Each structure stands twice: as C-alpha cells, then as structure tokens.
Amino acid sequence: MSRLNIPMPREQLERVVRQIVRQRYAEGLAAGEPQMAIAYEPNLVVNISARHMHIAAEDLATLFGPGAELTVYRWLYQPGDFAAEQRVAIRGPRGRTIENVRILGPVRGYTQVEIAATDAIALGIDAPVRPSGQTDNTPGALIIGPKGVLEMPSGVIRAERHVHMSPADAEAYGFVDGRYVRLQINSDCAMTFDNVLCRVDPRFLLEVHLDTDEGNACDLVNATSVELQA
C-alpha cells in the first residue's frame, strides 16, 4: 500500500466535505425528502494535467527497488490523488529522452504514461488519443528509474480531454457518464474544445483535465471564465 506521509491539506478536505453534502442533497431530492429551497450550482474547475505516469506495484518495484512505495509530493484536486516524489525518465524509440516525469499516486492496477502531442513529437512516439486505461494497441517506451529499467510494450497515450463529475454535478448539467460535451474557455485566446468526455463517479469533484498543449493554446492560466456546454 502507498504511504501518505503528508496530511491532506485543509482546502482539499473542505472540497471533499462540500462534495459529500452536495451528493447527499441530490440523493435526498431523488428520494422525495423535503429540502431547503437552495439551488445547486456546480463549481467547475479546469486544470492542466502535465505529462505523468500511473504505475502498477510490480513496475514500481522494478524501477525503484523491492518494497518501494509512492510518497506524497503534492496533493491533487481529486480526493486521494497525489503527485508523488518519485520521478522517471521516458525514452522513445529514437533514443530521445524526457527526464523528471512525475508518477501520480496512488498505485494502480496498470502502468500508463500520459504525454502531450509536443512530448510525443520530441520522443518520436506516435501516441494516440485515448481515455485513461484504454491502452490496447498503443505504443510503448523505455522507462528509466533509479533502481532499474522497464520496457513498456504499450501504454503511452495522449489522454483524451475529460471532465470528472459527481452524479449531482451530472444531474445539474443534464449529462451522463460517457457523454461528450464542449468546454468554452474565455480568455485572450478564447477557444471551445469539443469531445470532452464525461466521467461520472460519486468520488469525483467537478474538474476538467486538459493537457499542456491544450492549456497553453487557450491561455488557460489567464482565462476569465470557463463553461461546460451540451
């Protein structure tokens, strides 16, 4: 199991509590329970997801030694997710390497590398756009850690842009799991992204993930507003 050596920050705990309250509110409405007349308003957050790696326990041992565990560098927006202290190098088929690629925790049941289009060009890897976890018929790479090397036969993708949302958020928008929606970014480089995949789960907070190329293209860091659209 992963060792979480840094307490969850207060702001993330508050987000989790708010999410639980919203979910209970939605469940109460569905059950016909009396509620206060307060309209539910989703709190949309859009973040850039830089290149990273998800890792299985056996591959973590290969790269960092037997008994290795992920340790927290920084908590992420989704409850329980964190950027780990552990980092690796990724080498493509032409010998080009990207150093210091961070692993995200906790440990998963599969190993996967997510990169942007410019990373794929730099590595010489023809990485397809895929939802996370769908790695069949994808290219691999050589992963270099401090204690060993992992030859990934597949698992390198460009993550399909997506939005995490709870059932309460999905109900507020009128969306369902697996639906594709649009994201409007209002900035000096205003842009609308089509084909944003909805991923609905009670554990999720409302958050869109764009990769670095997409975030830079729309000047996300200076955006004045963001909006999900059907």
Image (cartoon, grey):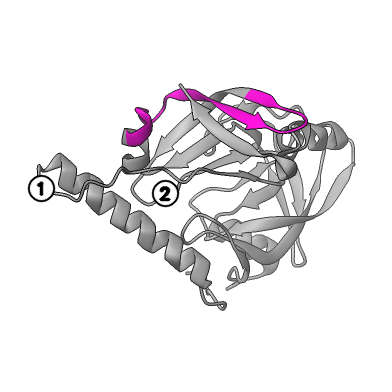
- Kindly identify the amino acid type of the residue bearing the numbered disc 2: Phe
Classify mark 1: residues with Cα within 10 Å, few (<14), some (14-19) or many (20+).
few
Whether residue 181 sits left or right of residue 160 in the image: it is left
Is 184 part of what is drawn in magenta? yes
Q: Is residue 198 left or right of residue 32?
A: right
Which dot marks residue 204?
2
Residue 224 highlighted magenta (yes or no) = no
Q: Is residue 93 visible?
A: no
Image point 90% across, 41% down: which residue?
95
Q: Where does the image place residue 6, in percent across and percent down from the top left?
A: 57, 77
Point out the stretch of residues depicted in magenta: 172-192
Quarter where residue 221 is shown:
top right
Q: Work out whether 50 lies above or below 146.
A: above
Q: Earlier in the sequence, mark 1 or mark 2?
A: 1
Q: Nearer the viewer, residue 58 or 1?
A: 1
Which disc, if any, is residue 147?
none
Per the model, the C-alpha gap separating discs 1 and 2 is: 24 Å
Residue furthest to the front in view is: 37
87 versus 152 height, above or below: below
Mark 1 is on which residue type?
Glu
Residue 183 can be seen in this image? yes
Judging by the rendered image, the residue that carries numbered circle 1 is 33
Q: Residue at x 63, y 27 (%)?
A: 129
Q: Residues within 10 Å of mark 2 (few under 14, many from 20)?
A: some
